[in-house]
Image (spheres, helix red, strand yellow):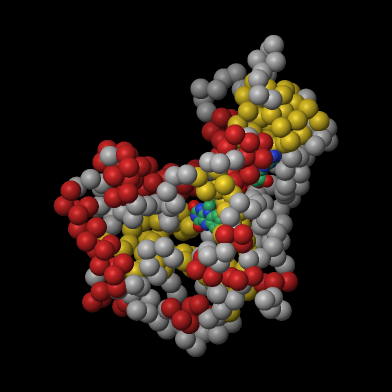
Amino acid sequence: MKSDRTPVADPVHSFWTSVSNPLDDLLSTDDLSTEADIVIIGAGFAGVATAYNILTSSSSSPKQSVLILDARKICFGATGRNGGHVKPDLYFNVSKYVSMDGASAAAEVTNFEAANVYAVKELVEAEKLDCDLHLTRAIDVYLGADHARQTEAAWEMLRRDNIVELRDVACVSKEDAERVSGVKGAQLAVSFTAAHLWPRKMVHQLLAKLLEQDHKLNVQANTPVTSVSDTTDEAGRWIIETSRGTIKATKVIHATNGYASQVLPEYTRSITPIRGVCSHIDSALKQHAPHLNNTYALRFDGRNYDYLIPRADGSIIVGGARQRFWHKPERWFDTVRNDELVDEATTYFDGYMQRHFRGWEDTQAQTKKVWTGSKYRSLLPMRN
Ligand SMILES: Cc1cc2nc3c(=O)[nH]c(=O)nc-3n(C[C@H](O)[C@H](O)[C@H](O)COP(=O)(O)OP(=O)(O)OC[C@H]3O[C@@H](n4cnc5c(N)ncnc54)[C@H](O)[C@@H]3O)c2cc1C
């Protein structure tokens, strides 16, 4: 059932994409080049970070020409619609990784995740990106008694077996969990270093820096790639067909997230687009609300959880609500539609802060926006 609340009025935009950017519809040149050394398909986090690494790497000399193509506006995929949480997994899935791939692989993945938080911070500082980056702690709050007990037992095993680095991970048991986390009914709270930022600002600004630096970079928004040849031509180049013409390139990088199989049908069974839901909550009385310094995951049980990112302006991003629609796969599975709401989830965030957070009862916090995003799901286990 649709309500007439603000979130429904504009299903196309997320909180982040509501602010337009001059790069949104960028065409570096009026005409599409017919060749490039490297073509990157997709201008989200993955595509722009790849271009950044190629173009700023001292080893890629002489400089190669890079052409980024996006089917839509720049950063209108998952990068423009996510929560902005830079959250490593330092413990939650570790036992699963150990049983799948062994202790050393689990440790490698965990170290990589931990290092990524600081790598993002270093990049933002080095490139002077103004993207609301905050280094913080993430608190995973367990609300189900059984799940909390199982997690605490698993945590004790991780400590005993000394498989991964746990120096930065702190576990607060039931007795103090609600007071320490501020979440009502908390049975267990686990915290560790994380960060949050405005993802779209970060990517736009990184792209703007590359364009300013006069690299051999050309960016073409609103240019869908319709196919890439299966083999190269006699000069070793791939043939890329787009809505605006044909391009030849020696390397093609697919950074298309859940859309991957539209150009690479061989991935249809292994990369499936799925939808997620996010919201923005604000309060006219936020000066009376306790300011939350940490980010959160509220884990209701082993499957269902929300994640919450308090912004420095006192408003809150909350993503999740999957218990409202997960049992209806047609609403979220195998769809790239991010321009419509998952109606079942729209009212989920109403009263969220009042329900879950101590001291927020009288803040009149309200859902200001709800949106949908599409991301990929692979055959690998789901991450939380
Ligand atoms: C609701 C939601 C919340 C999330 N929250 C978080 C979070 O808090 N923290 C976190 O770390 N991650 C989060 N994620 C995941 C995160 O957003 C993604 O992992 C990340 O943005 C992926 O970046 P990307 O560049 O791979 O994909 P995208 O940003 O989706 O970019 C892919 C691009 O490829 C383009 N494209 C696709 N096909 C073609 C084609 N044929 N031709 C040309 N262009 C094409 C698309 O238009 C798109 O711009 C969330 C995702 C969603 C959906």
* Rendered location of residue 205, percent (x, y): 62, 47
Say which quadrant the N terminus sits in: bottom right
Q: On the picture, is 94 further left or further right than 68?
A: left
In the image, is residue 78 above or below residue 3? above
Q: Can residue 209 be spotted in the picture? A: no
Q: Nearer the viewer, residue 312 or 296?
A: 296
Dividing the picture into quadrants, the one containing residue 340 is bottom right
* Rendered location of residue 258, percent (x, y): 59, 46
For the point 39% across and 46% down, which residue is it?
Answer: 113
For the point 72% across and 47% down, which residue is it?
Answer: 72
For the point 34% across and 79% down, which residue is it?
Answer: 185
* Rendered location of residue 348, percent (x, y): 55, 74
For the point 73% across and 71% down, which residue is it?
Answer: 9
Q: On the picture, is 306 further left or further right than 60?
A: left
* Rendered location of residue 66, percent (x, y): 66, 29
In the image, is residue 288 above or below residue 22? below
In the image, is residue 87 above or below residue 40? below
Q: On the picture, is 309 further left or further right than 368?
A: left
Count of numbered labels shown in the rendering: 0
Q: Can residue 83 be spotted in the picture? A: yes
Dividing the picture into quadrants, the one containing residue 186 is bottom left
Q: Nearer the viewer, residue 102 or 265?
A: 265
Residue lying at the far left in this picture: please name it: 160
Say which quadrant the C terminus sits in: bottom left
Residue lying at the far bottom in this picture: please name it: 362
In the image, is residue 129 above or below residue 294? above
